[in-house]
Image (tube, rainbow, N blue to C red):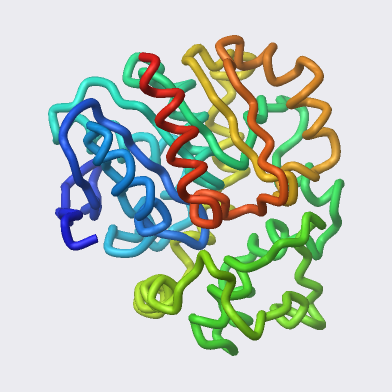
Amino acid sequence: MEKIEHTTVSTNGINMHIASIGTGPVVLFLHGFPELWYSWRHQLLSLSSLGYRCIAPDLRGFGDTDAPPSPASYSALHIVGDLIGLLDHLGIDQVFLVGHDWGAVIAWWFCLFRPDRVKALVNLSVAFSPRNPKRKPVDGFRALFGDDYYICRFQEPGEIEKEFAGYDTASIMKKFLTGRSPKPPCLPKELGLRAWKTPETLPPWLLEEDLNYFASKFSKTGFVGGLNYYRALNLTWEITGPWTGLQIKVPVKFIVGDLDITYHIPGVKNYIHNGGFKRDVPFLQEVVVIEDGAHFINQERPDEISQHVYDFIQKF
């Protein structure tokens, strides 16, 4: 881990912290919520040893990267803009893109906006979701799961932050990272975070030092930067009308754990396996469903994921 270099790059009006290691073709790793560059620690070491230059930023709002206060600063155009600026600053023309959770959502947008900058994409957990011109995304989640669904509960600035304030950061991280239930995560107001169990012991893939790293960063920054991604969901929908109906035109491999909450959203399995995904992502080459894999699969099954990424990108 001490071989990983840490630098700060000025891009798109913010300062962005990046972790990087290795030389060769560039792999850009995009993390999710509530995470950091650190979620890719295993893949950085593994793929750099196989001849790749691995770069994992703290995305806007996270860790040591700037966090503008307004949710209106967190649309997909802002986040992809940060990444294009990062590549331009580093003089990198094209990358292999690897995303997970929110990072996967951003990676899909990246491929819609700037396919010229992407050699191939490996996305984890979140399948492509074409823009529905008739319904805003938060309205869609509310219709499916009700007001207690975590994405709906995250909408009102300050509300969920108040609940988080009643817990130490390590407990919050533990609740998020160790969940293995494929059921929709709901946070009823009367229960709040008590609705999610805190495990007595950590799973073998999450060391105390890992938990402490995440907790140390989030206790400094709070969670508002990450929550702003959810608060900008409808804004992104409003401003991306011109891309409605556009296909993802880069080579793609998709990986999901069979216990991942995202895989159990009504209609998603059917979309992935029965032609919808391939229609919208015509260069989709592989779909991998990992048995007994939960949401944070890049950390839970690091060697398997690194191998899957390598097997795909080394073809190009």
What residue is shown at x 71% (from left), y 38% (from top)?
Answer: 136
Q: Locate residue 154, reporting x and y percent.
A: 64, 63
Kindly tell me whether residue 231 is visible in this rendering.
no
Kindly tell me whether residue 32 is visible in this rendering.
yes
What residue is shown at x 56% (from left), y 42% (from top)?
Answer: 235
Q: Locate residue 130, reporting x and y percent.
A: 66, 25
What residue is shown at x 19% (from left), y 26% (from top)?
Answer: 92
Q: Locate residue 97, reporting x and y percent.
A: 39, 31
Q: Quadrant of the C terminus?
A: top left
The reply, left or right, for residue 214 in relation to residue 89 is right
Q: Is residue 57 above or below residue 285?
A: below
Q: Is residue 52 above or below residue 282?
A: below
Closer-to-camera residue (86/56): 56
Q: Is residue 161 above or below residue 184?
A: below
Closer-to-camera residue (51/276): 51
What residue is shown at x 54% (from left), y 25% (from top)?
Answer: 253
Closer-to-camera residue (204/223): 204
Q: Locate residue 229, reporting x and y percent.
A: 52, 52
Total numbered labels: 0
Q: Quadrant of the N terminus?
A: bottom left
